[in-house]
Image (cartoon, grey):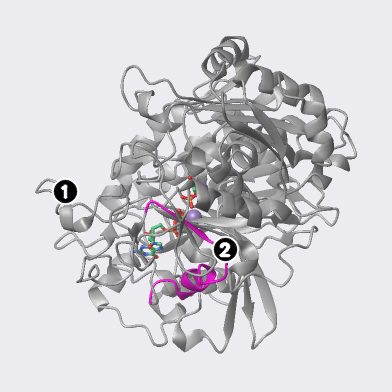
Amino acid sequence: MVDVAAALEAGGLTNPNVREYVEYWAGITGASRVEVVGAADDARLIAEALEAGELDPAGEGLYYSRSYSKDTARSEERTIVATNRESDKGVYNNWRPAAEMKPLLVERMTGASEGKTMYVVPYLMSPLGAPLEKYAAGIELTDSRTVVLHMIRMARVGAKFINELAEPDHFVRAVHVTGDLENLGQGTDDDQRYFVTVADERTILHFGSSYGGNALLGKIAHGLRQSAYDGWASGEFLSEQFMLIGITDKQTGKRYHICGGFPSASGKTNLAMMLPPDALCERYQVDFYGDDIAWLWVGDDGKLYGMNPEFGVFGVAKDTNEVTNPTALASVAPGTGSIFTNIAYNTDTHEVWWEGRTPAPPADVTGWVDWKGTPIAERDEAEKDAPWAHPNSRFTTTLANVPNVAEDFEDPKGVPIDGIIFGGRTRDREPLIRAINDLAEGVYDGLTLGAEATAAADGKEGVLRYDPMSMRPFMSYGEGDYAAHWLKILGQVKDQPIFAHVNWFQRSQEDGHFLWPGYRENLRPLLWLMALKNGEVEGVQTPSGIIPKESELNLDGLEIPQADLDKVLSIDLPRWREEMGHREKHLKGFEGLPEEIWEAHKRVAKAFDES
Ligand code: GDP
Ligand code: PGA
Ligand code: MN
Ligand code: MN
């Protein structure tokens, strides 16, 4: 048995409530050593990981990691929210009784860290001093050094975040055990993995993965699932899979903040890192606050505030290049300490590559290995056309490395929210942007977000499905209660943000090309939205919201075929009428959906009937 008390003392973790927790799990997992880590240990841990072959060098201060080939994305099927109340069961949260799941996890984890170090990672999902700080503290126990290195980039990590808690026992207990990855039956009927959030006990138990979304417990399990539950249970806040940006009009001096949800791998990080299009650079500036999670609450002044609980970016590599996202490339430049996962790697030159980094892969394949480690030169016939990088390959870097990070990104008071947008990959029907002024209709719009599934989750790329507010994989309680909580929080806000639904992914029915050029050009519809909120433009009222007149959209310097522009600025009435029937069925699945949401649905349906 390891001497936990000595390890905590050596690591400066003095909060008296920690010891029992760590001793309990060290006993179960059978870890051989216990070590408290903080951000100050990064250089040493990097050196150890390089030495152990867990990381490879990828240029000055850059690192390359590879996860097991069947462990490359979040698993939605194996993710469970367990509580002690059956009334927490929803359509998407895979609810199970806490009493059933905890013993199962104990069984899986028993002896599973034998011979390994159990790292004790004290973290805070919030800037210090934020109004919601009391929901932000946690301790992740993990048997993976690579997970620790990612946590140090993605969260504020150090003993002080736990030692100085106002309520010393109020921290999330998050246990991660990797397991024997080659023998877990991933994706089969005999799948051994379990990713469980015991939400009403603020305990997270994840077994059977070392991939980011399953293993960085501060980020998704705590930062989204647990905190969504905490926000609802306390009645104090919302926790959403939202990006958060500031837009400054340098000509008028006006500044806006927009947050919004898009399913994983649907454009949040790119939007948050967006440089304005060349023609608009002089007048506008976009500031990065967050790219994946926002916590929202009502301030004392009655405004809605938002903040990013994270400390870093875990971004999709695919298609990131000088044209689509120069900001992202700069944030992973030499010297940034960034870690790449599951991209292609050159074992001689230590260069990295992913699909879309350059139009074609390196012509000379000498030294290049794909994301599985297979030399490109030795790939067999079946592998020849497979991508070099995994479609869900990622880069991990800290917010401070992002060139357009807002000056006040660590300011605990958060930023006032002017707009809330929803969007996803939708190949038809959804126009470029449609604005919604009514609160219930805005919440209704979020609840009926429909989009194509992506490679960020195991299994079902391309399938069209509903993904309420982009929270489908992170829902921790019933959807009816979730809708009511939204109405309650937003109902307290004096200066209501405007809602909008956006779509950068409409495609040509003939050849499949994207009708809207996307990326930096996405600033244009957002500027229109703020102009609409200010009463500077009026748009065209449609049954599902207000869409821009072409003349109202700033198109300076944009080259786009007229037919494509016409299409993204129109409402496809027959497709929408069909959609209304699907929505009705979708919403009927939600128990206890507030009457206001049904009324919103009926108003929109009636408007389509009459149009
Ligand atoms: P996130 O997972 O929601 O943060 O999405 P990302 O911003 O990482 O983008 C996911 C994928 O979508 C990447 O491959 C991007 O290159 C691509 N993407 C992002 N924004 C756009 C856009 O406006 N248009 C198109 N066509 N692709 C985009
Ligand atoms: P993403 O973040 O939304 O940027 O893909 C990671 C995730 O949600 O798994
Ligand atoms: Mn996400
Ligand atoms: Mn992202």
Tag count: 2
Residue at x-position 84% and y-position 57%? 301
Is residue 170 something that shows in the picture?
Answer: no
Q: Is residue 295 left or right of residue 595?
A: right
Graded by Cα atoms within 10 Å as few (under 14), some (14 to 19) or many (20 or more), the crowding at tag 2 reads many
Mark 1 or 2 closer to N-term?
Answer: 2
Q: In which quarter of the image is the N terminus?
A: top right
Residue 113 placement: quadrant: top right
Residue contact between numbered discs 1 and 2, judged by CB atoms under 8 Å: no
Q: Is residue 227 left or right of residue 363?
A: right
Is residue 126 something that shows in the picture?
Answer: yes
Q: Is residue 90 above or below residue 270?
A: above
Q: Which of 605 and 358 is in front in this view?
A: 358
Three-letter amino acid code at the position of disc 2:
Gly
Q: What stretch is highlighted in magenta?
A: 323-342
Task: Where is residue 155? Give x, y as percent.
Answer: 66, 50
Task: Where is residue 208? Give x, y as percent.
Answer: 47, 28
User: Of the numbered discs in the image, which one, if any, rests on residue 383?
Assistant: 1
**Mark 1 falls on what kind of element?**
loop
Q: Distance of mark 1 from mark 2, alpha carbons?
A: 32 Å
Residue at x-position 67% and y-position 37%? 227
Q: Mark 2 points at which residue?
A: 337
Q: Nearer the viewer, residue 565 or 88?
A: 88
Three-letter amino acid code at the position of disc 1:
Glu
334 magenta-colored: yes
Task: Where is residue 81? Give x, y as percent.
Answer: 56, 24
Q: Is residue 252 left or right of residue 379?
A: right
Q: Nearer the viewer, residue 269 or 11?
A: 11
Q: Is residue 325 above or below residue 554?
A: above
Graded by Cα atoms within 10 Å as few (under 14), some (14 to 19) or many (20 or more), the crowding at tag 1 reads few
Task: Where is residue 516? Give x, y as percent.
Answer: 33, 69
